[in-house]
């Protein structure tokens, strides 16, 4: 994949907002996922730990830990994007992420809903920082992450 | 289709909010569609008059008239739901709506995004009226409209 064109200014916007959000990553991660499910309730069915659960979403401990992990991974990948020139993920691999999303049958419109939910989450977390430039920086980073995942969306060999 | 269980109180909430929104139907309709496209940019591709257009969405006169027509139809169908006991549409038929949505390949997640965008539009239009009961009333009416459209989503004969 081509190296990403991501400016120092854009990196600074990511780092500045992530520095504030980091300490609330558990809450913000859950808000992020609750926003996705508010917009698209049926997407809960793609999560094994939600499919047959009777626990309310905001009390579901598996959702909480999953949400935090995804939110942290997304933000860290964005924070490292300029330094590394590509998407890097911790505690998993892009192959694994691709395979998980492939098996769940995630489609383009869902990546779009998730992008919107991420913006809303960050906007609510750092309302005084949020502006078009910051949205654009997060958008570029998110799109790179999605491209990297999609490149690995195929049956696991 | 079974007659809808829609209380007088729910009807009153629809009528009260629609009475206020009606005079701004053009603006609100456009906001409604811009919200859908903000969440899911790729869905513009399902509209023939947007696919090859270079005009910004908020300046597109075809989108404006289409948005208003859809918004008015949605709200009027909701306003008449209790009286008629079923979804009624003007200036078109449910068969035609079903066929248009079938041909465009509209899928469930898009009906969900549209539901969320409708809520956001009404919430912004009548913030002092908006509450869980009103959301619920609009949600029931919207779901009935979608059910009626889906029942007709098949190739035109």
Image (cartoon, coloured by chain):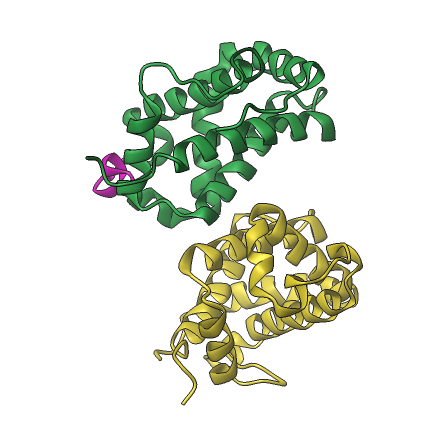
Chain colours: A green, B yellow
Against B108, is A41 above or below? above
Q: Is residue A131 visible?
A: no
Residue A39 image point, x, y percent: 48, 46
Name the foreground residue: B33 vs A62: B33
Q: Determine if the magenta segment contains residue B5.
A: no
Residue at 33 percent across and 33 percent down: it is A98
Residue at 54 percent across and 57 percent down: it is B114
Q: Residue furthest bottom?
A: B157
Against B140, is B128 above or below? above
Location of the N terminus of chain B by quadrant is: bottom left
For the record, the magenta segment spans A47-55
Against B88, is B64 above or below? above
Name the foreground residue: A8 vs B87: A8
Residue A104 image point, x, y percent: 29, 42
Residue A11 image point, x, y percent: 64, 15
Location of the C terminus of chain B by quadrant is: bottom left
Residue at 71 percent across and 68 percent down: it is B68
């Amino acid at each position: 994949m081509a190296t990403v064109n991501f400016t120092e200014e854009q990196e600074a916007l990511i780092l500045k907002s992530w520095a504030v959000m980091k300490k609330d990553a558990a809450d913000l991660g859950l808000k992020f996922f609750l926003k996705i499910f508010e917009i698209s309730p049926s997407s809960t069915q793609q999560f094994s730990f939600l499919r047959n659960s009777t626990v309310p979403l905001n009390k579901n401990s598996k959702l909480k830990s999953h949400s935090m992990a995804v939110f942290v991974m997304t933000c860290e990948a964005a924070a490292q994007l300029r330094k590394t020139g590509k998407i890097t993920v911790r505690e998993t691999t892009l192959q694994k992420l691709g395979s998980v999303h492939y098996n769940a049958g995630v489609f383009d419109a869902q990546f779009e809903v998730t992008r919107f939910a991420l913006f809303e989450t960050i906007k609510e977390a750092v309302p005084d920082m949020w502006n078009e430039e910051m949205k654009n920086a997060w958008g570029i980073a998110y799109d790179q992450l999605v491209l990297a995942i999609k490149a690995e969306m195929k049956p696991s060999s």
